[in-house]
Image (spheres, helix red, strand yellow):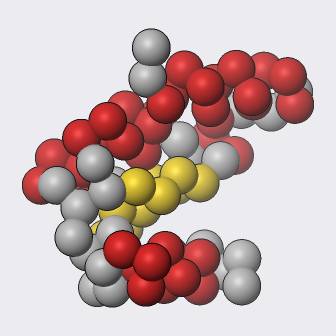
Amino acid sequence: MNKCAGVSKACELLGISTAQVAAIGDSDNDMAMISECGFGVAVGNAFEGTRKAASHVTKGKSGAGVVEALEWLRVI
């Protein structure tokens, strides 16, 4: 079980594809989720593998990186 399994189940229930989902993370346990979703973002202080799996890596770390990711995704 990993976070990607949860995202996949949520997508199934919503009738959408993981390609329509953005994932933001920093840990090794976020890598599968980030690589399987349509838009994967790693925050600046993420583990190396997580950064490599991401479509975009923020300059900001932790919460500032999440805000930057949401701005990059044009959510806020």
Q: Position of residue 29 (x, y in %)?
A: 32, 36
Q: Is residue 74 above or below residue 20?
A: below
Q: Is residue 18 above or below residue 12?
A: below
Q: Position of residue 27 (x, y in %)?
A: 28, 48
Q: Could you tell me which residue is drawn at 24 percent across and 41 percent down?
A: 28
The residue most toward the top is: 1
Q: Could you tell me which residue is drawn at 34 percent across and 62 percent down?
A: 42
Which quarter of the figure is the N terminus placed in? Answer: top left
Q: Could you tell me which residue is drawn at 16 percent across and 46 percent down?
A: 49
The residue most toward the front is: 63
Residue 10 vs residue 37, the one in the foreground: 10
Q: Is residue 72 above or below residue 35?
A: below
Q: Position of residue 74 (x, y in %)?
A: 67, 80
The residue most toward the left is: 48
Residue 55 appears anywhere in the view:
no
Residue 75 appears anywhere in the view:
yes
Q: Position of residue 66 (x, y in %)?
A: 49, 74
